[in-house]
Image (tube, rainbow, N blue to C red):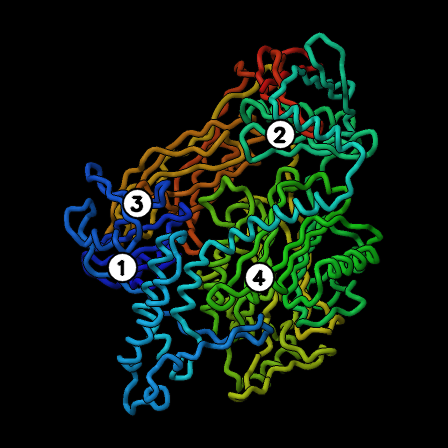
């Protein structure tokens, strides 16, 4: 399949539309990977200047079928090539039969970056299988590989292939290997004869076969490592008791239990029966954390035992609304008895440094104290520690433990605090570390990390990104550290790196699959060596250095590639960056910050690396979410690398568990109403659309009815929608802190045509009109306009969020896990009883 000209791999939907529009012939088609379903494909067909998309889905036997028009018999195929061949015939359920394959655009060969790569095997000696006269001399004027030699080479390998047992291989892989030997082997051999040992078609074959291998390794290795760490621990005397408990769980034994929350006394009790004795209780200050799972109704309570050990207790409620009521009650109890309120504001340090494959100096405190050039912290405040430190490095030569110890020691020296490790993620020598104050350890949950390779052929990890995400109480954070393609002339490739990271970095709430990372977090920070350069001729090098010495940065920033690409909407759409008031951080002579080393002698001549702001920190937050940059600059005294470390600090608003101030017997009832919504989509697709609404204030995502399409002469489509959403809590104070994520999807292939975010605070007073930009994979795809209104009616009796409950069964296993299902009935005066059953 990889050698088929019509297969375009994981290109975006908009790229596919552009390619078909350029073809401009009815019946033009291509295949790409589905954006919504892994392992599925999308068949895109051009007809009357519109693009029609059909999903190709595998069944349980891995056979493929096209979701075509209703009433057409479904046909199954083993390989895509046979499927495509069949749909060249008319009357197969497509808008028109396939006629003209749109070929994949060949990407130019990339020059490898000057880094150390894993050892590579030497190229095969293809001449060994050639006839003697052909192997010793080339034919003058012939650019093609000799036909006789090609036939001999192909026949040799096909004969070998017949003696290899491939019965257990996927048929798609078998077909790909056969296609390579039949159609592409000679092309690679010809390039080897001409002095090019890269074997591009073999590379494509291997990349295709290994398509899902990297993700499987990344998914499986952490599990095996966790299992290994468990086995490596010394067995304790209580191992027999643990086995007994696990056995009881496997037998499905159940017990009955009540959970009693006494707000006045500040205790939570466990009871085996409604009127029975209280078997166990935890005091409010021993309840360390409430973790709301992405699974509907699931709650994890982290508590501290008498021996200062923590255990996790799992509860599963009937629905999210009842879980929310229970959490409100627990938080009300903690608020009543605690003298330490939950924070509504924290400060975050974000730092990025390309270490240049050199060990750091002993003193790096100035980095964390934000001392140096640019917008820096006042001397009276630079010793005040931040709540969270996020440190991204590139070309980092240290091991994870050594670098972690270095960071912790540096922070301990400047703050006298032993910071807690929250996460660390490494891809080759790209690394991100997250540290937090000890007091915040139990406020942080849902920690995820991931990486994406964007090196040569998107297979090498010398370039790419690492990321970490987590929840701080009720606020989601995402951090991405990237090292993009180097070279002044490669800004387009850097833009492609950015899109690849957006598409494939897997962080945050997995229920938000339709959205890339730009919409998954309340606050997203993107840092790293982005490698965008000052776009000026090399002859201007001395002039650039002069302007830097005179601190005339604005004229140079006008030629900054990242600034220009952002201005044209090609990259980092709708991100913010604080004004740059510090000198370019690259490329210095090492051990000094007085001289830039902007020339480099190479075999091909002198290479220029003009001084540039390669190292950057950008951010993107939900609308009306509070974030303020307090500093943005670089150090002057850390000189072991040709890059200077960059720092940025932010004051960030965070949300805690909501507790209603209203009378629980008179909870407001209402909804969120979207009215007169019109989505304007820049697409040539011929399909119908609907909206998906996602929010933590909803029980689950809501799917609208099909919208009404209206095509316009400018090539856009306008779609009308309207919906009312029912939140889990209708308290206006709660709703005003919520955001609604919207995704416009097609009915034919369930793929996104644009995503956006609306802040409910915008509708604080009355009906409010809104307009949001729609983006998809980093591109603007349209806009959504309409009105929003929060509908509330005070004083109506509604279902209580908490109250007396009936008996329940609880399946108990390990004492750290107890599973409940909550059923709520009539209200009781405090203390309130919860009952649960499985």
The local secondary structure at tag 1 comes to: helix
Q: Where is residue 161 in the image (x, y as percent from the top left)?
A: 36, 64
**Mark 1 neighbour class, 10 Å CA radius: few under 14, some 14 to 19, many 20 or more:** many
- Looking at the image, is mark 3 or mark 2 earlier in the sequence? 2
Q: Position of residue 281 (x, y in %)?
A: 77, 21
- Residue drawn at (54%, 66%) of the image: 484
- Looking at the image, is mark 1 or mark 2 earlier in the sequence? 1
- Nearest the eye: 587 or 672: 587
Q: Which residue is labeled 1 in the image?
A: 20
- Looking at the image, is mark 4 or mark 3 earlier in the sequence? 4
- Looking at the image, is mark 4 or mark 2 earlier in the sequence? 2
Q: Is residue 541 visible?
A: yes
The local secondary structure at tag 2 comes to: strand
How far apart are the alpha carbons under marks 4 and 2? 34 Å
Quadrant that contains the C terminus: top right
Q: Which residue is labeled 4 in the image?
A: 482
Q: Which of marks 1 and 3 is in front?
A: 1
Q: Do the residues labelled 4 and 2 touch (CB within 8 Å)?
A: no
Left or right, residue 109 beside residue 227: left
Q: Can residue 729 be seen in this view?
A: no
The local secondary structure at tag 3 comes to: strand
| Mark number, residue 718 | 3
The local secondary structure at tag 4 comes to: strand
How far apart are the alpha carbons under marks 4 and 3? 37 Å
Q: Which residue is labeled 2 in the image?
A: 299
């Amino acid at each position: 399949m990889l050698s088929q000209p019509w297969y375009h791999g994981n290109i975006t939907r908009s790229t596919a539309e552009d390619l078909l529009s350029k073809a401009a012939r009815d019946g033009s088609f291509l295949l790409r990977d589905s954006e919504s379903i892994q392992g599925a494909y999308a068949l895109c067909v051009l007809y009357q200047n519109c693009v029609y998309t059909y999903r190709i889905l595998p069944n349980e036997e891995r056979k493929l079928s096209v979701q075509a028009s209703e009433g057409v018999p479904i046909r199954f195929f083993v390989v895509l090539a046979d499927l495509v061949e069949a749909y060249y015939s008319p009357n197969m359920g497509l808008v028109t039969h396939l006629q003209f394959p749109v070929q994949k655009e060949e990407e130019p060969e990339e020059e490898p970056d000057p880094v150390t790569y894993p050892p590579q095997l030497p190229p095969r000696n293809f001449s060994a299988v050639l006839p003697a006269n052909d192997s010793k001399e080339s034919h003058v004027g012939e650019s093609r590989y000799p036909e006789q030699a090609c036939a001999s080479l192909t026949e040799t390998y096909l004969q070998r292939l017949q003696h290899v047992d491939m019965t257990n291989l996927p048929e798609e892989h078998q077909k790909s290997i056969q296609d390579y030997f039949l159609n592409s082997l000679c092309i690679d051999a010809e390039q080897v004869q001409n002095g090019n040992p890269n074997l591009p078609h073999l590379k494509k074959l291997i990349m295709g076969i290994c398509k899902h291998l990297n993700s499987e390794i990344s998914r499986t290795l952490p599990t095996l490592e966790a299992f290994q760490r468990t086995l490596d621990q010394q067995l304790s005397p209580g191992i027999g008791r643990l086995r007994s408990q696990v056995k009881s769980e496997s037998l499905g034994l159940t017990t009955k239990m009540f959970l009693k929350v006494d707000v006045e006394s500040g205790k939570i009790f466990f009871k085996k029966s409604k009127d029975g004795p209280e078997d166990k209780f935890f005091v409010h200050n021993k309840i360390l954390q409430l973790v709301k799972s992405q699974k509907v109704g699931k709650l994890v309570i982290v508590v501290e035992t008498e021996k200062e050990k923590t255990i996790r207790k799992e509860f599963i409620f009937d629905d999210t609304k009842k879980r929310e009521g229970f959490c409100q009650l627990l938080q009300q109890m903690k608020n009543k008895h605690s003298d330490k309120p939950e924070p509504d504001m924290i400060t975050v340090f974000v730092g990025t440094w390309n270490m240049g494959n050199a060990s750091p100096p002993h003193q790096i405190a100035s980095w964390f104290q934000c001392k140096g050039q640019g917008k820096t912290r006042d001397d009276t405040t630079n010793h005040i520690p931040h709540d969270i430190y996020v440190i991204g490095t590139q070309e980092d030569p240290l091991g994870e433990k050594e670098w972690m110890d270095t960071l912790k020691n540096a922070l301990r020296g400047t703050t006298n605090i032993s910071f807690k490790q929250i996460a660390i993620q490494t891809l080759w020598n790209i690394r991100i570390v997250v540290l937090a104050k000890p007091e915040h350890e139990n406020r942080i949950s849902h920690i995820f990390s991931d990486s994406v390779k964007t090196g040569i052929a998107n297979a090498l990890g010398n370039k790419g990104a690492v990321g970490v995400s987590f929840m701080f109480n009720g606020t989601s954070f995402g951090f991405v550290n990237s090292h993009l393609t180097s070279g002044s002339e490669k800004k387009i490739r850097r833009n492609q790196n950015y899109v690849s990271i957006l598409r494939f970095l897997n962080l945050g709430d997995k229920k938000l699959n339709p959205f890339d990372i730009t919409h998954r977090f309340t606050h997203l920070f993107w840092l790293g060596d982005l490698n965008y350069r000052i776009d000026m001729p090399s002859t201007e090098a001395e002039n650039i250095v002069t302007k830097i010495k005179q601190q005339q940065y604005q004229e140079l920033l006008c030629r900054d590639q990242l600034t220009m690409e952002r201005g044209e909407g090609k990259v980092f759409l709708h991100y913010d960056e604080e004004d740059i008031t510090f000198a370019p951080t690259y490329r210095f002579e090492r051990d000094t910050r007085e001289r830039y080393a902007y020339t480099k002698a190479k075999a091909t001549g002198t290479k220029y690396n003009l001084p540039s702001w390669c190292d950057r920190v950008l951010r993107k937050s939900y609308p009306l979410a509070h974030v303020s940059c307090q500093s943005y600059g670089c150090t002057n005294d850390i000189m072991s690398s040709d890059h200077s470390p960059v720092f940025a600090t932010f004051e960030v608003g965070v949300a805690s568990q909501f507790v209603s101030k209203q009378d629980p017997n008179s909870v407001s009832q209402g909804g969120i109403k979207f009215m007169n919504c019109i989505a304007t989509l820049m697409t040539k697709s011929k399909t119908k659309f609907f909206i998906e609404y996602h929010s933590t204030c909803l029980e689950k995502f809501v799917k609208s009815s099909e919208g009404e399409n209206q095509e316009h002469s400018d090539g856009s489509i306008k779609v009308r929608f309207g919906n009312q959403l029912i939140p889990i809590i209708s308290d206006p104070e709660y709703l005003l802190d919520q955001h609604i994520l919207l995704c416009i999807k097609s009915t034919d292939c369930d793929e996104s045509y644009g995503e956006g975010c609306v802040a409910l605070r915008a509708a604080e007073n009355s009906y409010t009109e809104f307009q949001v930009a729609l983006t998809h994979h980093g591109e603007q795809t349209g806009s959504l306009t309409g009105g929003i209104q929060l509908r509330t009616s005070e004083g109506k009796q509604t279902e209580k969020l908490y109250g007396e409950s009936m008996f329940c069964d609880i399946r108990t296993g390990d004492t750290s896990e107890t599973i409940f299902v909550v059923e709520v009935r009539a209200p009781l005066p405090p203390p309130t009883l919860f009952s649960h059953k499985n």
